[in-house]
Image: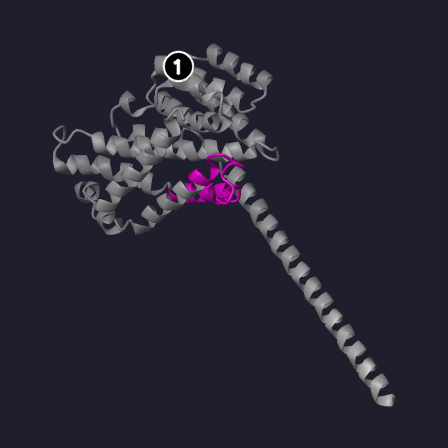
Amino acid sequence: MKKIIFILLLGSAAVSCKKSTETTERESGADTAAATAAATATAFTEQRKLFFNNLMEPAEVAAQVQFTAAEFNPALMSDPKTYVQYTGNEVKAAANLGIYLSDLNYSIAYKQAKTTKTYFTAAHELSKAIGGEKGIMEFLMKRYNDNISKNDSVKSVVTDLLKNSTSKLQGTEKEKLAGIAMAAYQIENLHLVLGTLESYPKDMLPGDARTVILVPLFKVALNQRGNVQNIYNFLKSYSDPSDPDKNPNYPYYANAFEELIAVYQKLNVEEKIASNKGLEIMNDAVVKELSEKVNAIRNKIVSPT
């Protein structure tokens, strides 16, 4: 009888110990999951803060292109008359807003007043399409029309347009659209720089003179790597490749920028830049790959579907 009681007590203790172990494991698993979620939330908050704190001043790249004395090339720009085909899809609207903002500043840098007006209208309409406050958008349009003959004033209006189209979305359910807009803005900046390099006349200047122009221009493209990385980090936090229907096209942009960063990492042109070997840079296979990648992403952005 005593043996039976002893066995029962032993079994009860074993069951109790097992339950205690399972409870501890569950609690440990829950703590780990909570810690992971907290770390993810913290990382996202930091990336969001970094992204919104580092939105580029819109005229930066365009001004650097113009400073090289390269001629204005409207063939590199996206058609502003097609903005209507993007207004029905907020992702497309945000992306092509970024394209138009870059083209707009390129036009301003070269003081192309007529072209600037067309691009401002397109960017203004797409800003409204992604949720820009109507009152602010109309005020900016009035400021633009009142100052259209003053190039510096127009630059100021466009800077405000960028901020109200992107920074104002921070903390809202649409803030991810700011990431898309700035991704496309960055792509168009690179497209304008690399396109200018590729189209620069080969017989206009002797080799040494061309090098003086090409090397600083290529440095502009090279120096955009930090911005590409910053935008990628922000977009990645929103992308869900396992559920692409949840956020249409967001996984595409994150993946595309990841591939673009990989190309940047393969660039090994510092020695050529230091030696001012601009012509050799333009024949570099990785530089051509960078240009091809940028154009592929841009074609995806400007396509109507």
Q: Quadrant of residue 82?
A: top left
Q: Residue tagged by mark 1? A: 118
Q: Position of residue 287 (x, y in %)?
A: 25, 43
Q: Which residue does the image show at 32% across and 24% down from the upper left?
A: 77
Magenta stretch containing residue 285, yes or no? no
Q: Residue type at mark 1: give it.
A: Thr
- Magenta-highlighted residues: 225-253
User: Which residue is painted at 64% across and 60% down in the image?
Assistant: 32
Instruction: Count the numbered circles shown.
Output: 1
Residue 228, x across and y down, in percent: 41, 41
Q: Secondary structure at mark 1?
A: helix
The picture quadrant where one finds residue 293 is top left
Q: Nearer the viewer, residue 242 or 14?
A: 14
**Which x, y percent locates residue 212?**
21, 37
- Circle 1 residues within 10 Å: few <14, some 14–19, many ≥20: some
Q: Kindly identify the residue that appears in the image at 37 percent across and 26 percent down.
A: 303
Please identify the quadrant where the C terminus is shown.
Answer: top left
| 239 falls in the magenta region | yes
Which image quarter is the N terminus in? Answer: bottom right
